[in-house]
Image (cartoon, grey):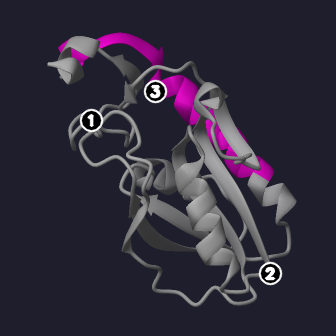
Amino acid sequence: MEKDISKILLTEEEIQEKVKEMGQLISEDYKGQEVLLVCVLRGSIIFTADLMRNISIPVKVDTIAVSSYGSQTKSSGVVRLLKDLDEDITGKHVLIVEDIVDSGLTLKYLRKILEQRNPSSIKVCTLLNKQERRVHEACPDYYGFIIPDEFVVGYGLDYDEHYRQLPFIGILDPKIYKG
């Protein structure tokens, strides 16, 4: 699998250091409160697990699944809800945990449906912020790294359900996904 990576963008060590910093910041910002982490499946599951271990305040976790990619490398432009939350978020502090924010379409969709459920607050935490691709206003409250407009995999991010288990984030060789 590593042979399919044209360049390692973020090492495992860089990622873990940033996740630790983000966990500390979130703990400070929500001090004295409980936060519900909403893990956006499947890409952010590894990030959410590591982030939880670096947050020192009470947290709960739930999952939601949406899709706008399928097996493509660019968004289809249509977001579909595949799995809804199990928790009632009324009156709760919700932190949406994403792996990557690029066009902003998915995040716009998630905020809209979750705001209708009357949480106390909604914030967004993403590991990767791909600002060059932003089409919809979607500014994450917490982000780890600003990255270039490249197709990245690893640390939960995939191409056609492959490469998620890589401990680093790398740029996928375009020959792989352009066939």
3 sits to left or right of 166: left
Where does the C terminus fall, quadrant-wise? top left
Depth check: 154 or 66 in front? Answer: 66
* Residue type at the position of mark 3: Glu
* Residue type at the position of mark 2: Ser
Q: Which secondary structure lies at badge 3?
A: helix
Where does the N terminus fall, quadrant-wise? top left
Residues under labels 1 and 2: Cα distance? 35 Å
Q: Which residue is label 1 attached to?
A: 159
Q: Is residue 22 magenta?
A: yes
Depicted 32 relative to depicted 48: above or below: below
Q: Is residue 128 visible?
A: yes
Q: Which residue is label 3 attached to?
A: 12
66 sits to left or right of 161: right
Q: Which residues are magenta?
A: 2-25
* Residue type at the position of mark 1: Tyr
Position of residue 75 measured from the top left corner of the image (x, y, whole percent): 41, 42
Residues under labels 1 and 3: Cα distance? 19 Å
Residues under labels 2 and 3: Cα distance? 34 Å
Seen at 76% across and 55% down, the residue is: 26
Position of residue 161 measured from the top left corner of the image (x, y, whole percent): 22, 44
Is the magenta region chiefly helix, strand or loop?
Answer: helix
Q: Which residue is label 2 attached to?
A: 120
Q: Is residue 132 magenta?
A: no
Position of residue 46 measured from the top left corner of the image (x, y, whole percent): 42, 49
Q: Earlier in the sequence, mark 1 or mark 2?
A: 2
Depicted 86 relative to depicted 168: above or below: below
163 sits to left or right of 170: left
Q: Which secondary structure lies at badge 2?
A: loop
